[in-house]
Amino acid sequence: MGLATAVTWLFTALVGIYLLYLWLSGGGLRQQATKVTRFPVTLIFSHPALAVTGLGCWVAFLLTGSKVLAWVSFGVLASAALLGFTMFTRWLGGGRHARGAERRFPVLAVLLHGLAGVATFVLVLLTASVARSL
């Protein structure tokens, strides 16, 4: 189950990279000065930074079998998930009046990223719960 979790996590990351690309190419960073975007830079970059850190801990868990690393990974992922939920609610709040670079986000990409993120969260929780240290 640990390897399936890593694959799900990587899929989530790929869709997230696509969304980040759309935001950056749509002028997300340039819109910070004019407050056009609903996404602060710290939110945009903290979410993937935490997710990648959690994935690194997960890979370390897979390599070592350390239950502590599984739970550290879960905690870091939980923080990333809260930031992701914050971005999702800000994106939803834009509705048809969305402004800024995030208005270019395809609904399907947002849904895939969110659903894969929830699946990853559940898989990490379940795997950490049954993990035994070697």
Image (cartoon, rainbow, N blue to C red):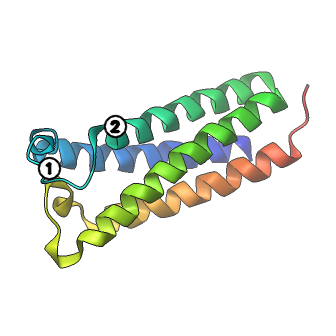
Quarter that holds the C terminus: top right
Q: Amino acid at mark 1?
A: Lys
| Drawn side of residue 97 relative to residue 16, left or right | left
Q: Quadrant of residue 54?
A: top right
The crowding category of the residue bearing disc 1, from other C-alpha atoms within 10 Å (few below 14, some 14 to 19, many at least 20), is few
State the image coordinates of residue 37 (x, y, percent, origin top left). 18, 53
State the image coordinates of residue 31 (x, y, percent, origin top left). 11, 45
Residue at x 84%, y 48% (from the top left corner)? 129
Give the vertical position of 89 relative to 19 (above or below): below
Q: Which numbered circle lies on residue 42?
A: 2
| Drawn side of residue 10 relative to residue 130, left or right | left
Residue at x 64%, y 46% (from the top left corner)? 5
Residue found at the far bottom of this picture: 96
Q: Which numbered circle lies on residue 49?
A: none
Q: Which numbered circle lies on residue 35?
A: 1
Q: Are marks 1 and 2 in contact (CB under 8 Å)?
A: no
Residue at x 28%, y 44% (from the top left corner)? 40
* CA–CA distance in space, label 1 to label 2: 14 Å
Q: Secondary structure at mark 1?
A: loop
| Drawn side of residue 38 relative to residue 44, left or right | left
Q: Amino acid at mark 2?
A: Thr
7 or 125: nearer the viewer = 125
